[in-house]
Image (cartoon, rainbow, N blue to C red):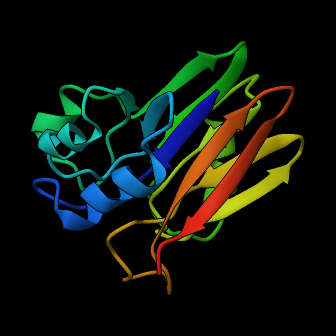
Amino acid sequence: MKIGIISDTHLNIPDNRLEKIVDDYFHDVDLILHAGDMVEREVLDVFRGKKVYAVSGNMDPDSVREVFPEKRILVIEGRRIGLIHGWGSPFGLEEKVMREFDDVECVVYGHTHRAMNDVRDGILLFNPGSPTDQRFAKHNSVGILDIGKEIVGTIIDLD
């Protein structure tokens, strides 16, 4: 199974950048995970009928928070994946988000706008970065998770 991973879009409506990402990188994914800070729910319309699982982030208004939880566990192809945005200082964020989940093989998160694809204590920590904002990172990016015998993450640099 191939999953498109995105976070920190910070948009009110889909724009040309997001349309291009879907056309170029997410056209053949089975589903989408959005790790929060979409800012408006309409941003998810860009995924054109694909199944989307999302969580709310610290910059999301009540209209988003009422629909999407702050964290969730998804079971995909028998694999447990934690999905969360993150909060506070980016320093030590990986340890904080890992503590939010028990018995997961992967934690997908956002918040820092910096991509991360690293295994710690046997758990894949995967942050796709931000496709639209460079306040905290030098590059825009999204990600792909391939689920087979293992969960394999790939960061896609958009710059």
77 and 38: which one is in front? 77
> Above or below — where is 49 with respect to 118?
above
Q: In which quadrant will I find the N terminus?
A: top right
Q: Residue at x 61, y 34 (%)?
A: 2
Give the image location of residue 157, x and y in percent: 55, 72
- Disc tally is 0
State the image coordinates of residue 11 (x, y, percent, origin top left).
Answer: 18, 60
Classify residue 126 as left or right of residue 18: right
Instruction: Please tell me in which quadrant of the rendered image residue 82 appears.
Output: top right
Q: Residue at x 36, y 50 (%)?
A: 22
- Residue 115, picture quadrant: bottom right
Question: 143 or 138: nearer the eye?
Answer: 143
- Looking at the image, residue 24 sits to the left or right of residue 94; the answer is left
Residue 65 x %, y %: 22, 34
Which residue appears at 65% of the width and 51% of the height? 126
Residue 95 lies, in percent from the top left, at: 70, 52
Q: Residue at x 77, y 43 (%)?
A: 152
In this view, the residue in front, 120 or 11, is 11
In this rendering, would 141 be left or right of 116? left
- Quadrant assignment, res 75: top right
